[in-house]
């Protein structure tokens, strides 16, 4: 069954439930540029497909760079020894030169074999036979990287799934610290929980600041808030501190500003056509923004109406180009960032 269009998180949970209950598809194609769900599912299949005593004879784990299609097909067509099934896992399957030849096996896979093709950071060509055949006989899990605007929402959902509640500003701070890397968010959360009192359920911005290593006072999250309110002195101070960081990279700082002002532009355009939009329209314009922060965007739209928001976005594109080495002159990345912040405030 084709599963590529299904939400990766929901599908992963569905697969995990099935394999833990002993139900397996004959073929799994795990692909995409976000490895979190792919690794989770692959590990669960390996852990549950065989009893420990059956692994020596019935488990084959190999890497795409070391095998060809004929070798994998030969392994997959063997029958299990003293076990209900056998497991064949090909990690980094995208490294196989003749990967598409596996489509021949997928036309008629053995029910007694579980074949897993793991493609971390890559995807099968959906126009070709392998993808089409696995979609018919097995399960395709496609896990793509989150968009910036999805991260805070994913964090809130992830925390809820672990029986935790994270404050909206705390989720925004963690999103800034970890970016869209789900694996890093999970690691940072595990570290956080080890440092908090046992039984802690509610996670605050202070918890994130103390245990994840990000300062609320000097963060991109704080900068967008000060820019929205046109607090010039405070915004320039925050920008200077961010730019002085040893790990500072101008394009990485411009990206969240671009997301922020794109939301301001969409929300401003909505307010121009509908002075009192309902919550559904506001949520669509401020995609990914927790309602807790909507008031900030009301202030931002009053300070950056559509024309000014467009000018800021144009400015951000210019400085993104400069940050990538284009026509930056003698200015350092920090100086460029302060200059950009000052120009935004002057629009």
Image (tube, rainbow, N blue to C red):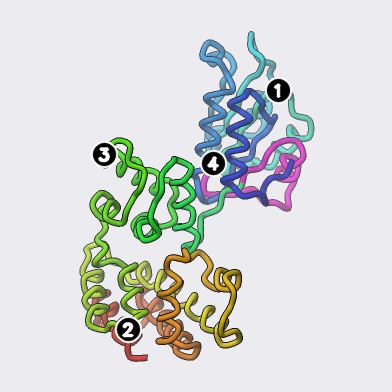
Residue with the mark numbered 3: 197
Q: Position of residue 226 (x, y in %)?
A: 31, 77
Left or right: where 60 falls relative to 236: right
Observer-nearest of 301 and 103: 301
Check the image and name the residue furthest to the top: 82
Question: Which label sits in the foreground, 1 or 2?
Answer: 2
Secondary structure at badge 2 equals loop
> In the rendered image, which quarter is residue 25 located in?
top right
Q: Which residue is mark 2?
A: 230
Q: Is residue 133 magenta?
A: yes
Q: Position of residue 155 (x, y in %)?
A: 44, 52
Residue in the foreground of this view, choosing between 153 and 163: 163
In the image, is residue 265 above or below residue 193?
below
Using the image, tell me which numbered label, if any, was put on residue 38. 4
x and y percentages locating residue 334 in the rendered image: 24, 75
The numbered mark, 2 or 3, whose residue comes first in the sequence reads 3
Q: Which range is magenta?
A: 119-141
Contact check, label 4 and label 1, Cβ < 8 Å: no
From this view, report whether residue 205 is shown above or below residue 249. Answer: above
């Amino acid at each position: 069954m084709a599963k590529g269009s299904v939400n990766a998180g929901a599908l992963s949970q569905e697969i995990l439930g099935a394999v833990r209950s002993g139900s397996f598809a004959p073929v799994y194609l795990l692909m995409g540029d976000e490895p979190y769900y792919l690794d989770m599912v692959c590990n669960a299949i390996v852990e549950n497909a065989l009893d420990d005593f059956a692994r020596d004879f019935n488990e084959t784990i190999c890497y795409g760079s070391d095998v060809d299609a004929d070798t994998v097909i030969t392994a997959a067509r063997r029958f299990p020894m003293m076990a209900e099934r056998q497991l064949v896992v090909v990690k980094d399957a995208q490294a196989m030169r003749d990967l598409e030849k596996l489509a021949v096996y997928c036309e008629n896979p053995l029910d007694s074999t579980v074949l897993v093709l793991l493609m971390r950071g890559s995807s099968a060509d959906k126009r070709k036979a392998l993808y089409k055949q696995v979609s018919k006989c097995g399960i395709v899990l496609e896990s793509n990287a989150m968009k910036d605007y999805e991260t805070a929402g994913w964090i809130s959902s992830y925390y809820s799934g672990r029986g935790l509640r994270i404050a909206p500003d705390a989720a925004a701070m963690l999103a800034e610290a970890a970016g869209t890397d789900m694996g890093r968010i999970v690691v940072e959360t595990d570290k956080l929980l080890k440092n908090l009192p046992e039984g802690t359920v509610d996670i605050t911005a202070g918890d994130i600041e103390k245990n994840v290593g990000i300062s609320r006072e000097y963060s991109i999250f704080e900068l967008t808030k000060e820019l929205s309110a046109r607090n010039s002195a405070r915004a320039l101070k925050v920008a200077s501190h961010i730019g002085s960081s040893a790990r500072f990279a101008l394009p990485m700082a411009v990206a969240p500003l671009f997301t922020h002002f794109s939301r301001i532009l969409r929300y401003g355009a909505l307010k121009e056509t509908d002075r009192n939009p309902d919550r559904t329209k506001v949520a669509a314009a401020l995609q990914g923004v927790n309602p807790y922060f909507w008031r900030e965007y009301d202030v931002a739209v009053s300070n950056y109406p559509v024309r000014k928001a467009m000018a800021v976005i144009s400015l951000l594109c210019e400085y993104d180009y400069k940050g990538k080495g284009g026509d930056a002159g003698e200015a350092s990345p920090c100086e460029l960032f302060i200059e950009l912040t000052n120009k935004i405030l002057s629009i």
